[in-house]
Amino acid sequence: MSGRRHGNTNPVGQRNSNVHNETSSRNASRFKWTYEQEKTLIELYDQAISMNDYTLKDPTVLGREHMVDNFNRAFNLNINYAFFKNKLDDFKKAYKKWKFLMTSTGITVNPETSMIYASDEWWEARESGCKITRSFKRQPPPFWDVMVRCFLYYDVYSRTSTVVTPTKTTNID
């Protein structure tokens, strides 16, 4: 077995000419997302999910390729789908948190905008110790209207179900 399992496979002296603009999933956490990049990503995710009429939780291979190609073209990057995972997970966490807050008692929720109207005390109790809730600044997360379409299937929670099987009945005359 070779001792170079994780080493560079390029011959010595040769470098990848695209290294300066490649972004891997390894350094995705250090990538500074702009508003425009976030907006583009969630819109491309929406397009990818809509390719299957919003019936799947995640995009198909074709949808993922669509996202990567268009994002790379828009921002002159060379990335793969794995790079998007952390940002999409952040969007999903924000969506789930806001949905949870909307089910609280003692508040009013505008059905059109999903805006939560609550007392300062209510907000302060939820914002203390929760970075996600604080980041909302008492407004629905950015791109909320798109999140509602895209993350619909992330509202489904596991439930135990009972299967009823028909029984054969016989009539005795």
Image (spheres, rainbow, N blue to C red):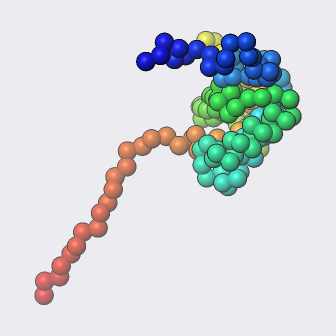
Estimate the x, y position of residue 139 in percent, counting from the top left. Answer: 77, 27
Identify the residue at horizontal 77%, vertical 34% (top origin): 41
* Closer to us: 109 or 51: 51
Estimate the x, y position of residue 22 in percent, counting from the top left. Answer: 76, 23
* Closer to us: 12 or 167: 12
Q: Does residue 168 sit above or below 38 in this rendering?
A: below
Q: Is residue 139 visible?
A: yes
Identify the residue at horizontal 63%, vertical 47% (top origin): 60
In the rendered image, the quadrant that contains the C terminus is bottom left
* Closer to us: 20 or 23: 20
Estimate the x, y position of residue 84 in percent, counting from the top left. Answer: 69, 30
Q: Does residue 53 sit above or below 133 in this rendering?
A: below
Identify the residue at horizontal 22%, vertical 73% (top origin): 168
Q: Does residue 168 sit above or below 63 in this rendering?
A: below
Q: Would you identify the image quadrant in which residue 15 lies?
A: top right
Q: Residue furthest bottom?
A: 173
* Closer to us: 19 or 120: 19
